[in-house]
Amino acid sequence: MSAIELDLLGDLGDDEIAVTSDIEDSVTLFQALSTQWRVSMDGPTGIDYTVIPMLAKAYGINDLTTAMKDIQLMEAKALELIHKK
């Protein structure tokens, strides 16, 4: 993370997040997957991983291993927030 990116983090409000260059591809891919959630009677259960390689290729994302790890972290946090009671 660059010094500029670290400086910008201090300017964020409580409801904002910073997307740094090291996770930009993963966040872009996660956003592209917004229509690919599997849903049950209880709500979203997770992302349909079968479409990830196709979308990664379409977005020119080459490091699929890192993107998958990042997406799984974002997915887990999203599910935690969605199903919070």
Image (cartoon, rainbow, N blue to C red):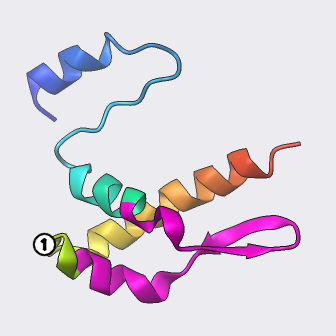
Q: Is residue 33 covered in magenta?
A: yes
Q: Position of residue 32 (x, y in %)?
A: 37, 63
Q: Residues within 10 Å of mark 1 (few under 14, many from 20)?
A: few
The relative height of residue 77 versus residue 76 in the rendered view (above or below) is above
Which residue is depicted at the point 17% across and 71% down? 61
Which residue is depicted at the point 51% across and 68% down? 35
Instruction: Look at label 1 and name its amino acid.
Output: Gly
Q: Is residue 70 visible?
A: no
> In which image quadrant can residue 6 be found?
top left
Looking at this view, is 16 or 77 the one in front? 16
Q: In the rendered view of the protein, which quadrant contains the N terminus?
A: top left
Residue segment shown in magenta? 32-56
The relative height of residue 30 versus residue 10 in the rendered view (above or below) is below
Which residue is depicted at the point 79% across and 64% down? 43
Q: In the rendered view of the protein, which quadrant contains the C terminus?
A: top right
Which residue is depicted at the point 32% across and 12% down? 10
Q: Is residue 41 covered in magenta?
A: yes
Q: Position of residue 64 (x, y in %)?
A: 26, 77
